[in-house]
Image (spheres, helix red, strand yellow):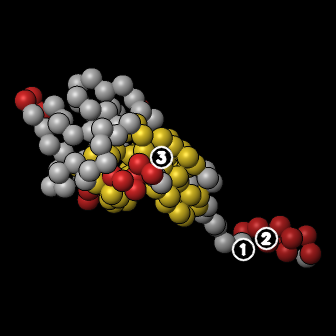
Amino acid sequence: MIRHLILSIPFLLPITSFAGDLNIHFTNFKNDSGTVLFLIFNDEEGYPDKNSKSFKEGRITAKLAMSEGLLLENIPDGPYAITAFHDENNNDELDTGLFGIPREGFAFSNNPIVLFGPPSYSKSKFKIQGQKKIELKFKYF
């Protein structure tokens, strides 16, 4: 009887999910005007620019992003990818020029090489498991 009770105890415990904090350090700004808009994705769907499919979206002033970065708390453990752009003129869109080439700075988690179009989710993907610090390095053309 006692043996059956001991074996069943683990099945009675609630399943817990773990969460950590994500510390984002932004670098390589051209200037401190405007804001940084970012999207965090926890899967490929909607990546890199569909706000409605993102896990989290937000904004931070460029000055604050440069000086302090961003701390996001209680992010569930798992895979994520981040896209961001430096909205220098605060019009809430990534301004582009001829052939869709960005006129404002942009960044992706893992800082992959960007030649023609955004990198894939898999190239930007990183894992949160407890505390995680990442750097998003802005690129300008």
Position of the N terminus, as image quadrant, is: bottom right
In x, y percent, where is residue 103? 17, 36
In the drawing, does residue 94 fall left or right of residue 59?
left
Type of the residue with mark 2: Ser
Type of the residue with mark 3: His
Type of the residue with mark 1: Leu
Tell whether label 1 touches label 2 (CB within 8 Å). Answer: yes
| Residue at figure coordinates x 17%, y 51% from the top left | 89
Check disc 2 and report the residue beneath it: 8
Local secondary structure at mark 3: strand
| Residue at figure coordinates x 7%, y 29% from the top left | 98
| Residue at figure coordinates x 48%, y 46% from the top left | 25
> Is there any visible trace of residue 105 in the rendered image?
yes
- Give 135 or 125, whichever is nearer the viewer: 135
In the drawing, does residue 42 fall left or right of residue 92?
right
Q: Does 5 appear above or below 49?
A: below
Check disc 1 and report the residue beneath it: 12
Of badges 3 and 1, nearer the viewer stands: 3
Outermost residue toward the left in this view: 98
Check disc 3 and report the residue beneath it: 25
- Give 54 or 91, whichever is nearer the viewer: 91
In x, y percent, where is residue 131? 61, 52
Q: Quadrant of residue 51?
A: bottom left
Q: Residues within 10 Å of mark 2 (few under 14, many from 20)?
A: few
In x, y percent, where is residue 8? 79, 70
- Give 110 or 29, whichever is nearer the viewer: 29
